[in-house]
Image (cartoon, rainbow, N blue to C red):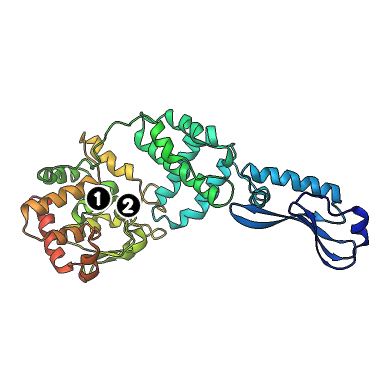
Amino acid sequence: MAMGKLFAAQIRALTKPGRYMDGDGLSLLLTAPRKGYWVLRATINGRRRDIGLGPLDLVKLAEARELAIDMRRDIQRGIDPIEERKRQKIEILTFKAAAEKVHTEQKATWKNGKHQDQWIKTLETYAFPKLGDRLVNDIEGPLIREVLLDFWLEKPETARRVKQRIGVVLDWAYANGMRATEAPMRSLSRALPRQPKQDGHFAAMPYENVPTFFKHLHKRTSVARLALEFLILTASRSGEVRGAKWAEINLGAKLWTVPAKRMKVGKEHVVPLTDTAIDVLERAKPYYAECSDLIFPGRNVLRPMSDMTLLKILQYAKLPFTVHGFRSAFRDWAAEKTSYPGEVAEAALAHTVSNRVEAAYRRTNYLDKRRELMREWSEFCVGR
């Protein structure tokens, strides 16, 4: 039906509230004499929708017809006028502003404080120079590729993290109505050159060399060397040891209870302490600062030492191993030199049970068996 059923004089004379059709989907919804609003009824993506075109006192008949024609043209081009209006009401942020919002919203869920800082700093260093001032709805694959190509092959691990974090920001923007699409990461992966393969394992010191390294640690005394010694004896992660506090230690029961918030798997972990490990704690007491309660404080006693502080001990000794690799050394030793079941060694490392059924039925943390296992490990480390 073509437009043209209504006339200006007729509209002025209308008194009965109701819908008055002009044709081709345009109608006037009269609420009172000379009061009402224009509506266009159209089918959008298979759904019949009513789209408001403005009140009668502001939009005259001719203007309403022109608006209806323009809107129908948009619909034919695949534009949803209702969604477009919603988007226009949303403030589109720059990539920098969006990244900072994502960081603020999500950092509370990250247990690792180091990760909280690194997440935004990597974007500040590598993404913000080219993307920071761009609106999030203006960032597509070619521009992201240009950012990543600068260091994609030279710093592959960093580049992968930056790529992932850019994707998180753009997906957040999409979820908040600031973009029409999600981040184009799948197609982007095909457009980037293949990175060189890397061994995903941590470089671990062979367990046979650990006793010799222990003697090296004892040549000097420092809080960092004590922390590394404690880390090896307890087969713990670096962050767990560097953040350890005296309040977590029960010397009477010879236990160290690491709270869930500091564990990688988010579950409390109880570590049996051997006499050798307790000796390390005794030697660490001179470094105690009441204001922080950290067992192995950094230069600033209010903050734990950095992971690099422990790694430098290995680097200064010209050893090509990582701190995390001592956990692998412990696991290899337990497998090759003891008869303890694998699940006991895995419990000592605070590894989760991958089999869901087995995990559901396991009700023990093997504490008694772990006491004996860690005692034997300590004796091996000190060369007894």
Give the residue type at disc 2: Gly
Crowding at dot 1, Cα within 10 Å, few <14 / some 14-19 / many 20+, comes out as many
Q: Viewed as shown, does residue 187 lie left or right of 51?
A: left
* Above or below for 244 versus 148: below
Residue 175 location (% of width, % of height): 53, 52
The residue located at (29%, 50%) in the rendering is 238
Residue in front for this viewpoint, 342 or 75: 75
Give the residue type at disc 1: Leu
Q: Viewed as shown, does residue 280 lie left or right of 268?
A: left
* Above or below for 364 versus 320: below
The residue located at (34%, 61%) in the rendering is 266
Q: Viewed as shown, does residue 58 lie left or right of 187?
A: right
Q: Which mark is residue 226?
A: 1
Compute the Cα span from label 1 to label 2: 15 Å
Residue 61 location (% of width, % of height): 85, 51
Residue 197 location (% of width, % of height): 27, 34
Q: Is residue 384 visible?
A: no
Q: Which residue is mark 2?
A: 239
